[in-house]
Image (spheres, grey):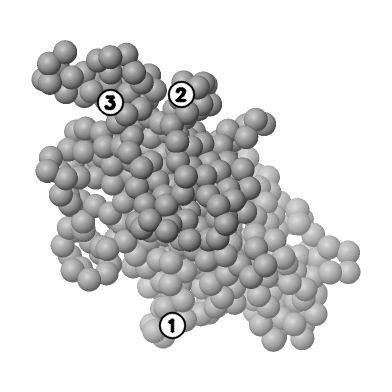
Amino acid sequence: MNAHFRLAAALIWSLLGTTWADAASEDGAPISADWSFWSPRAEASPEHVKKADGGKDGGGGLVIKTGEGEQWIGCWSRTLPVAGGQYYQFDAWRKFTAVAHPRRSVVVRVSWRDEKGGAVFWEEPAKAGYNKGTAPRAEPEYPQDVGGDEKGWGRFSDVLRAPMGARQAVIELYLQWVPNAEVEWGEVTLSPIPAPAPRTVRLATVHFQPREGKLPEEKPKLFAPLIAEAAAQKADIVVLPETLTYYGTGKTMEACAESIPGPSTDYFGELARKHDLYIVAGLVESEGKVLYNVAVLIGPDGGVVGKYRKVSLPRGEITAGLTPGHEYPVFETRFGKVGMMVCYDGFFPEVARELSNRGAEVIAWPVWGCNPLLARARACENHVYVVSSTYSDAAADWMISGIFDHYGDVLAKASQWGSIAIAEVDLSAHTHWNSLGDFRAQLPSHRPLKLGE
């Protein structure tokens, strides 16, 4: 078999998504010879072996095994040809034992290179970091572990797009920082696929102080025209402000509390069903003897999708007799995953991070008032879209009713009372920062462990 034919065959196998164990070399040996092992220094290099009958389906496996200590860093690596601009489905199966923190220790990286192995760049300008306004270098991608089966085999999977200048993809399969552990990798594929359809969603927020009416039950009706306006602009979800049935009543929070579901969610449910959209409303919840400050997600079918109980309570709510929540639920919607937080939660990075850790792509934020720098921080540090609805005056240089993107920039802002802001985003689009690349993808493996974790 001549060199040209071998090169052409390798290209075909790669583009078809063939695994390293699926094909044979000239003498019939497994193509696993294409995989090499790397470690940054001899003292940190784990044991490693190619297992002919390993892998999830017995077609061959790549094993890494560590000993005593936490110094270990090693990976199996292979370089495949790619076409610039092409989308690829990446998959790699793994099985590990004695790994205390898999998200930190069992990691996959995919790096893009030009025909000579040099760096390549994305086509779009960077919006954050140094060299703002220039095209960022294509930093490594981090496919995510999507879970496993009852036999212990799990899969890393992601859809990746090669930069236009890319001609090679370097795949790296790591085990790091863990003593006396083992991981086996198998069935690693990088398969060309058609460009996926965008997951566009139109995010809307209401900027309104419900001053009319002195009874809690009068307040939800004041938002009906603004929800209708958002629906006319084809909003998929509209966010309302915090404790809206309490605002301007002159009553205590206890007097404005209700069950969830209850009269307010029933009313907003009718509007959500009429306009075929999601509504997030800030309310005061009573459950037995307990009072909570809540954000409620109501679906297009009119039902309550779920609620979030404010975890971080300011002193005024403590003295009003409220109790903090202690859970960080994230809810599946027809357009993506939505988390919620309420006002004072935004002062603490843990709340948005916990929602992000659980997969939130959009965080709805009913907020009485807050430093807008915190809104920008929560959005950019988690690479999520934050939708805030506030009672603060837009002219006061304080909190706004707006939509913040992955860079912390404001995509849309409501400047007048009784108005809405709306922005369309693509939840499937990766955001590439200068020097960091797709930061959201790196959060699981790079964020620190909690004390005691």
| Label total for image | 3
Residue 220 locus on image (x, y percent):
64, 62
Of residues 396 and 39, the one nearer the viewer is 39
Q: Residue at x 67, y 31 (%)?
A: 150
Q: Which residue is drawn at 65% across and 30% down?
A: 151
Look at discs 3 and 1 and give the one toward the viewer: 3
Q: Which numbered dot is residue 334? A: none
Dot 3: element: helix
In the image, residue 151 sits, relative to residue 430, either above or below, namely: above
What label sits on residue 14 in the rendered view? 3
Please, what secondary structure does the residue beneath circle 1 have? loop
Q: Which residue is drawn at 38% across and 73% down?
A: 415
Residue at the far front in the pictured view: 42
User: In the image, is 421 to the left or to the right of 101?
Assistant: left
Q: Name the residue under label 2.
A: 52
Looking at the image, do the residues carrying marks 2 and 1 touch, with CB atoms under 8 Å apart? Answer: no
Spot occupied by residue 271 in the image (x, y as percentages of width and height) = 59, 49
User: Between marks 3 and 1, how big is the CA–CA gap?
Assistant: 53 Å
Percent x, y of residue 11 = 21, 24
For marks 3 and 2, give the CA distance: 20 Å
Q: How crowded is mark 1: few (under 14 residues within 10 Å), some or many (20 or more)?
A: some
User: Which mark is first along the chain, 1 or 3?
Assistant: 3
Q: In this view, does 215 lie to the left or right of 342?
A: right
Does residue 416 lie above or below 40 as drawn?
A: below
Q: Residue at x 34, y 65 (%)?
A: 407
The Cα atoms of the two marked residues, 2 and 1, are separated by 63 Å
Q: Which of 413 and 65 is in front in this view?
A: 65
In the image, what residue type sits under mark 3?
Answer: Ser
| Whether residue 96 is situated above or below residue 42 in the rendered picture | above
Where is residue 258? Give x, y as percent: 78, 63
Along the line of sight, which residue is nearer the eye, 278 or 133? 133
> Which numbered tag is attached to residue 398?
1
